[in-house]
Image (cartoon, rainbow, N blue to C red):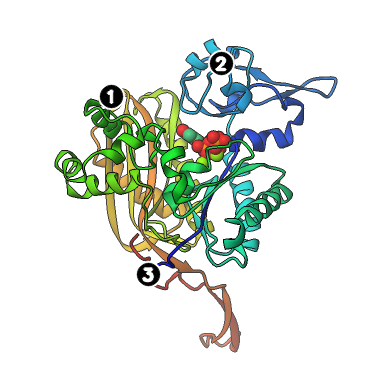
Amino acid sequence: MFPVSRLIAHLDMDAFYASVELLRYPQLRGLPLVIGGSGRYRPTRLADGTQAFARLRDYAGRGVITTSTYEARALGVYSAMGMARAARLAPDAVLLPCDFDEYRRYSARFKAAVRALTPMVEDRGIDEIYIDLSDVPGVAADGGRAIGLALKSAVMQATGLSCSIGIAPNKLLAKLCSEFDKPDGLTILTRDDVPARVWPLPAKRINGVGPKTTQRLAALGLHTIGEVAAADVGWLCAQFGGNYGTWLHQSAHGVDARPVVTVREPKSISRETTFERDLHVRSDRAELGRIFTTLCVQLAADLDRKGYAGRTIGVKLRFDDFRTVTRERTLPTPVAGAREIRQAAGLCLKRVEFNRRLRLLGVRAGSLVPVTQAPPVLIPTPCRQNGQNSGIRATLMTHATTVSGRPKRT
Ligand code: TTP
Ligand code: MG
Ligand code: MG
């Protein structure tokens, strides 16, 4: 089991996508900036060499804010807010489209910088990680402050970006307190701090309490984490079922035994896109075909980069009434190439009834198996004797993708 007392850090990058954009457009620092919307709103270069940026008020079409700088948040503009509403709140905010490839590069960079200092890292997505600091020498003496500061400065040095870190006895509390002092924060929370610093917070701040549970808790008169903590565990179990009731009780008391998992095999890898306008399967056939191919090519590149092949290929569609359907095929051998993915996904699409316009299309590879791609080798093979050019010729043999095992189910 775990050592008696663990020390876990949760590190989360500050306004991540927006901060990466500010590295290439430093002239926008200090201004309200939002990321999201379509690629049409890329900056344009003017004759005098300066760049012109779109403003939120210029935005036409649908879409949501992906993230915003703290200056934009001060105007009430947050992640997941509709563009139209955001434009009313902050018409002058600068608007930039997402550049996921760039964000992935910076994600890899900050994670590498952390791993170089502390190897026990659990990847939790593009801009956050957990780190088990329990075995860092001297960490018990200052509760993790020195290593926390060292991690922040390593991330800054590797990326030019700030992050916020929470250090606590477990993942639940670490995740909670990494937000206490955002941006550029470092918060250390001990078990003794739970009543004063955690109990006054709204129950939804517990990672795992979603909007539905929040509503049900509120209907039962429980609004803060402290109120959940004070509730009788048997009563919570009667309301929410044994597993969830117990989990709620423990979480509200700041108890969480989950380990930091340093290797995590993905269950599936997928790509999807929401269209700028709803597309019709017949009148927009060419455009849909192009989008479909691009998704398959991107998915193949993701699989290649991560070293997997998929035994199942599936599609996801969302219609203009928000109905979502998925179809999946299991293949005789795992595939990783764009052509094979497109073929299998195409067969999935044949099983869908298209009677409405489409707003989203996605392609997914599941039942992943790690692959090791052997390089092509030249092996000598004897030529057929035909009386003219006998002898040895080289035959290019491309090794098939070899499957080296099944991923762990997580
Ligand atoms: P977050 O860490 O939730 O947000 P953030 O880094 O932008 O801001 P904070 O300082 O509060 O941590 O998410 C990381 C990135 O993930 C974010 O920059 C953009 C993306 N994202 C979405 O695409 N959709 C969302 O709804 C959210 C919340 C984030
Ligand atoms: Mg973040
Ligand atoms: Mg995050």
The residue indicated by pointer 2 is 59
The Cα–Cα distance between marks 2 and 1, rounded to whole angstroms, is 27 Å
Residue 355 appears in the rendering = yes
- Choose top left, top right, bottom left or bottom right for residue 22: top right
Q: How many marks?
A: 3
**Mark seen at residue 1:** 3
Most extreme residue toward the left is 238
The amino acid at mark 1 is Arg
The Cα–Cα distance between marks 3 and 2, rounded to whole angstroms, is 54 Å
On screen, residue 187 above or below 409: above
Binning the other alpha carbons within 10 Å of mark 3 as few (below 14), some (14 to 19) or many (20 upward) gives few
Instruction: Give the mark, 3 or 2, whose residue is nearer the N terminus.
Output: 3
Residue 349 % position (x, y): 30, 41
Residue 59 % position (x, y): 56, 16
In the image, 219 versus 190, the foreground residue is 190
On screen, residue 141 above or below 186: below
The amino acid at mark 3 is Met
At x 65%, y 62%, the residue is 116
Residue 92 % position (x, y): 64, 13
Mark 2 or 1, closer to the camera: 2
At x 45%, y 38%, the residue is 196
Residue 354 appears in the rendering = no
Q: Is residue 160 left or right of residue 278?
A: right
Instruction: Give the mark, 3 or 1, whose residue is nearer the N terminus.
Output: 3
Local secondary structure at mark 1: loop
The Cα–Cα distance between marks 3 and 1, rounded to whole angstroms, is 54 Å
Q: Is residue 241 left or right of residue 6?
A: left
